[in-house]
Image (tube, coloured by chain):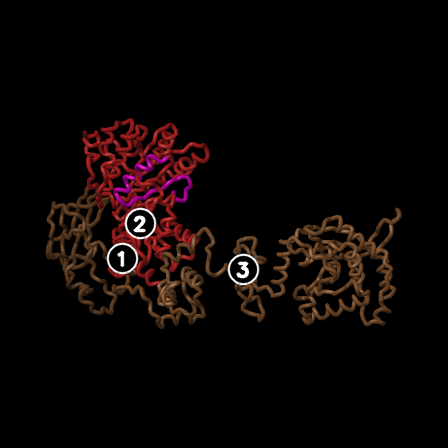
Amino acid sequence: MATAAQETGIRPAAATLVTFLEAIKQAMYEEMERDPAVVLIGEDIGVYGGAFKTSEGLLERFGWERVIDTPISESAIVGAACGMSYLGLRPIAEMQFIDFIVCAFNQITNFVAKGHYLWNAPAPIVIRGPAGGGVHGGPFHSANPEMYFVHTPGLKVIYPSTPYDAKGLLKAAVRDNNPVLFFEHKFLYRRIKEEIPAEDYTVPIGKAAVRREGRHLTIISYAAMMHTSLEAAADLAKEGIEAEVIDLRTLLPLDEETILASLKKTNKCLVVHEDTKTGGIAGEIAAILCERAFGDLDGPLMRVTALDTPVPYSPPLEEYFLPNKEKVLHAARQLAKY
Amino acid sequence: MAADVVMPQMGESIFEGTITKWLKKPGDKVERDEPLFEISTDKVDAEIPSPSAGVLKEIKIKEGQTVPINTVVATIDAAGSAAAPAPAAAPAPVPTKAETPKPAAASPSAPQPVASKPGPVPVPSAPVQTAAAAPAKEAGRVHSSPLVRRMAKEHGIDLATVAGTGAGGRISKQDIEAVIATAGGTIAAPLETAAEPAYSPQAPRPAVVPPPPVAPAPAAGPGGPAAHGTQYVPALQVGVPRERLYFGDYEVEPLSTMRLKIAEHMVSSKHVSPHVYSIDEIDMSKVAALRAKSKDEFEKQYGTKLTFMPFFVKAAVAGLRAFPALNSSLDGSNVVRHKEINIGIAVALDWGLIVPIIKNADEKNILGIQRTMNDLAERARSKKLRPEEVQESTFSITNPGVFGGLFGLPVISQPNVGILGLGAIEKRPVVINDSIAIRSMCYVTLSYDHRVVDGAIAHQFLHKVKETLENWSSPLV
């Protein structure tokens, strides 16, 4: 017997190939079906179905009380979501582009993140939205602002790289009693497809995944750069360099044990992220390795990151700005040779 | 040479695009970055610049057609442009910095210094000992890594003997694994298994080599603390993380052998013996008067100065005779009661401290004690003491008063169970028969091992010493 979701076509009856976008939509749909406390709030998510159509059809299915269009005020969206959560709801707040999450910075860092500590009032909200560059979105539609929030105790920060993980982690985020920031790399939205099981599943928050096994060096990455790293690892293998690729999946809390276990094996580490270099998670990982595994290091930690500038609008400049496979290969070869 | 023009990755999450208008016809000359065609996606309409200069050779995708990104939509013949780069298959040496042809249209310039030689990177799976090691050692230090240093330590390998094949002659993990492998099967365990039990970030690992001493291995000085350089010395434990010792401007020098021995002795004494301290005050006026009266004659006759110390030694002997518990040693659950009274006298040296022994002090008079003391102190300062002269003491006396100390609380010199500390002798107002008098007073302290000696004995001993000195009657010779 087909469920309502299957009738609408949002949730497939059997495992199918779905895009990243579809995985996000499925996760929200299923969680709203499962728990009436789950509501959506954001700009253009109702009638328009979301700027990237991630909530298309949800207004029709769940009604305007649970799919709430708002004025253009990210601060109001997060503040409202926070208040709703105090009254028992579990809102999913959408930032139309994650760049504008900083408009809600005060709400997130001073209220959402601290409530549990200050007033024993945890805010079980999810704040999600499209992030990342490589799509010529320019300086206001390409940001990777994850590290502002990784630096904020009280939050969890997720940045998945595959449709399977996106769905499983978003469901886990909705069910988590802590505020969770959920970054979706828009470059991946329609570019990758993956088979996703029809039945309900979650992916644990705070666990990294080893995407490729290797023994000469470890490449740590997440989101879109995880795919770049995998492509580089495939090329490196042809040169005799076996790179292990770790997909962090969750940035806060960081899965230190998986990182350390890999370093113990390869003794060399390269971190690839699309975020800018200074203050990026690569620096944090370098510190962790020095503190906890200095005697396992056979080379310097190396970083391939975006440059320390805003994301340029000019397409050639953006390509110069972003990490890419060639840059990863160059750094990996240097590290292997070291 | 033709370059491909592809459907670019435009707009958010776009994976396909529609060509709405070609702005050039085949055969038209185009400059790099000159608008070439217009596209429409579900988010944006845009003009697409030409990726390179040349002549538009062929349009492959017509207006109105929708194709996935990276589809070749046209080719540009770059012939006539200055670069004329060679195809990758023909590696002609290009002396100029001509750009290599980029098939991807949207990459007009190389984004990053790319590896200039695309050949395979040598990964030294079986490292060979090469001359590449030379530069690493030229500078007088061996370049390795934290991992390599740890592995060398665990396997007892001197890195100076290992040839490095890493960058700049660095000794790499592979290099040291090869050395371990050739050194014998017993230690040739692969890193994965060797590292597992040997190293845990949290717990100190049971290394083959014990933890390093606090003192860096001394570079100078024969007879330096080499023995301590290779073994763990509990006496030298640091109470705080070592890095907290190093701040500001500082110098580091190794402890002398004597200081190391003192450190070990003091720590073990404090560790072994529960110290208790008793203090008494002695009126030395009578002894002082006797000494003042006889010291010139004494020196003239016997060729040695008369000091207060022999009087204290004699008084201590009297106390030890009366309370022999203080003239003993503890051996497990047995007390060793010494029949000899051998009194160690602490002698301060410029470079430390030593405690030579006045053997059979009970058999000597003031003159004999003074002479023995002078001889021992003299030879202590000229480093001519014989080993037996610092052994077999049964009790000790130390004299912080000689440096002006009111009194001191000395640490017991093992294997004794007591040590007498002498304060400075100075004139103080004291009450005698309800009147105030000026007397030469001296505080004496007794540190004793409470396992063997109780406070009652200790205070009676001190009282005996006090009584002996305050009522001095025995002759000097």
Instruction: Report if residue B456 lies within the magenta region.
Output: no
Instruction: Report if residue A159 lies within the magenta region.
Output: yes
Q: CA distance from mark 2 to mark 1?
A: 22 Å
State the residue position of label 1: A326
Q: Are marks 1 and 3 in contact (CB under 8 Å)?
A: no
Q: CA distance from mark 2 to mark 3?
A: 41 Å
Q: Is residue A279 above or below residue B376?
A: above
Q: Which chain is red?
A: A
Mark 1: which amino acid?
A: Glu
Can residue A203 be spotted in the picture? yes
Foreground pick, B50 / A34: A34
Q: Which mark is residue A210?
A: 2
| Image x and y of residue A176, in percent | 35, 36
The stretch of residues the image draws in magenta is: A148-176
**Res B376 quadrant in image:** bottom right
N-terminal of the pair, mark 2 or mark 1, is 2
Residue at 57% x, 70% y: name it: B221
Secondary element at image label 3: loop
- Callout 3: residue from which chain? B
| Image x and y of residue B4, in percent | 16, 56
Foreground pick, A71 / A207: A207
Q: Which mark is residue A188?
A: none
Q: Which mark is residue B232?
A: 3
Colour chosen for chain B: brown
**Res A175 quadrant in image:** top left
Residue at 29% x, 39% y: name it: A168
Is the residue marked by circle 2 packed among few (<14), some (14-19), or many (20+) residues within 10 Å? some
Foreground pick, B14 / A34: A34
